[in-house]
C-alpha cells in the first residue's frame, strides 16, 4: 500500500544543529541515525519516525495545531 503513495518528505526545517546532550537535531528533533536513513527508507518507516517526532515535540512543549490532528496515513503494523 505504501508503495502506491508518493514518498513522505523529510521533516527537516533547515535548522541543522545537533544538541550536545541529546544528539537530536535542534530543528526537526531527529537522531543522526534517523536523518541518515531517511533517504532510503520506505513510507512505513518514515511514518513511524514522524510519530516519534510528534512525541518528542510534545515532551518539549513544541506542539502545533497539526500535532493535534490525526495523520491520514498511519504506520503499518506487521
Image (tube, rainbow, N blue to C red):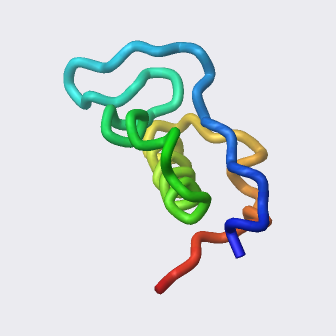
Q: Is residue 22 above or below residue 18?
A: below
Where is residue 8? Give x, y as percent: 68, 48
Q: Is residue 16 left or right of residue 9?
A: left
In this picture, residue 50 sits left or right of residue 65? left
Q: Residue at the location (38% across, 35% down)?
A: 36
Relative depth, front residue between 74 and 39: 39
Q: Residue visible at 45% across and 33% down?
A: 29
Residue 12 in picture, x, y percent from top left: 58, 27
User: From the viewer's perspective, is residue 11 above or below residue 73?
Assistant: above
Assign the N terminus to one quadrant of the image.
bottom right
Q: Nearer the viewer, residue 34 or 25?
A: 34
Q: Which residue sits at x=44%, y=21%?
A: 26
In this view, the residue in front, 67 or 42, is 42
Q: Residue lying farthest bottom? A: 78
Residue 61: x %, y % from top left: 52, 38
Q: Position of residue 10 (x, y in %)?
A: 61, 36
73 on left or right of 63: right
Residue found at the far left of this picture: 21
Residue depicted at x 26% and y 28%: 23
Q: How many marks?
A: 0
Q: Foreground: 34 or 50?
A: 34
Q: Is residue 25 above or below residue 73?
A: above
Which corner quadrant of the image does residue 72 belong to? bottom right
Amino acid at each position: 500500500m505504501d508503495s502506491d503513495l508518493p514518498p513522505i518528505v523529510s521533516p527537516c526545517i533547515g535548522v541543522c544543529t545537533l544538541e550536545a546532550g541529546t544528539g537530536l537535531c535542534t530543528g526537526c528533533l531527529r537522531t543522526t541515525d534517523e536523518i541518515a536513513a531517511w533517504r532510503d527508507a520506505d513510507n512505513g518507516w518514515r511514518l513511524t519516525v514522524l510519530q516519534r517526532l510528534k512525541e518528542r515535540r510534545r515532551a518539549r512543549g513544541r506542539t502545533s495545531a497539526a500535532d493535534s490532528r490525526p495523520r491520514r496515513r498511519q504506520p503499518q503494523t506487521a
